[in-house]
Amino acid sequence: MSEAEERFDSFLARVKDVIQGPPDEYYEEQAREYESYWHSLSDLVRSQVEIFEGQRINLGNAELALKIMESGIFHKGGLRGTQLDFKGNFEVHPINLLESFVVEVVASLGAFSHAKDVQGRDNWIRKKFNFLEKEINLLLSTVRLYKGGRAAQKLERKRKEMMSLEEDILQRPSRTPKLPDIKRDIAGIFHDFVEAPKVIIAERVSELLNFFGIDAKMESVRKKLKNK
């Protein structure tokens, strides 16, 4: 097994570990060790550590990272190239800083998905209104007990107005913000990290985006690489 394959398999195992999650005892021990470590750092080093940790694979993006790594665009720890024979052997194009490459692709695909997720935004709005309603209901009982029925009636009217406002807001058509140029962004990441001909990069970017349900023909991706 090559060094690239070992690195890929090791990183893939780490991603799966994040999804599965270690036992509570692990977190407790890690918290103690990290607090001691953190206090030993200078202010400059702390800022550098914060930047690095902001790019880590975490529970929020690990499943997306796993899907990318198992999408079929990789081969023996690198980017899959031209098929060499009928035995399943392909050219392998090196990927510099594999972990950073995956993290950047994750961030780009995540931002694009979030921008398109109209239903997700509506659910978030509904969730926040539901939270506010529960808080007002808790407040109502206290106001009624200590401030009297008239004060409680005023608060109840405001609660009903708020719930009516929720329905009005949710019934309005959602605006979709300008979407990122996902083909350009992903192609740029591949170009920066992968040592491969542009035609191979265009093929794999197209393959990856279509894997995620994003229509991306190879030629249209290749045009994004024209000036790189």
Image: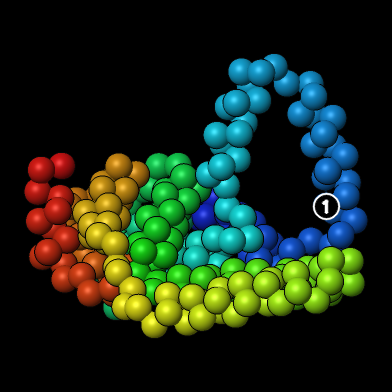
Residue position marked by numbered label 1 in the rendering: 27
Q: Nearer the viewer, residue 60 or 217?
A: 60
| Quadrant in the picture for the C terminus | top left
Q: Nearer the viewer, residue 120 or 185?
A: 120
In the rendered view, would you say 198 is above or below 17?
Answer: above
Drawn side of residue 80 relative to residue 51, left or right: left
Residue 126: in sight, yes or no?
no
Residue drawn at (85%, 37%) of the image: 33
Residue 82: quarter of image: bottom left
Residue 145: quarter of image: bottom right
Residue 180 % position (x, y)? 27, 57
Residue 224 % position (x, y)? 14, 53
Q: Nearer the viewer, residue 173 or 15?
A: 173
Residue drawn at (39%, 67%) of the image: 113
Residue drawn at (56%, 42%) of the image: 54
> Total label count?
1
In the rendered view, would you say 6 is above or below 176?
Answer: above
Drawn side of residue 49 relative to residue 151, left or right: left
In the rendered view, would you say 127 is above or below 4?
Answer: below
Q: Residue furthest front?
A: 150
Drawn side of residue 36 relative to residue 74, left or right: right
Query: Type of residue at label 1?
Result: Tyr
Q: Secondary structure at mark 1?
A: helix
Residue drawn at (65%, 69%) of the image: 132
In the rendered view, would you say 202 is above or below 135?
Answer: above
Q: Nearer the viewer, residue 72 or 142?
A: 142
Q: How is the image coloured?
A: rainbow
Residue 179 % position (x, y)? 27, 61
Mark 1, Cα crowd under 10 Å, few <14 / some 14-19 / many 20+, is few
Residue 206: in sight, yes or no?
yes
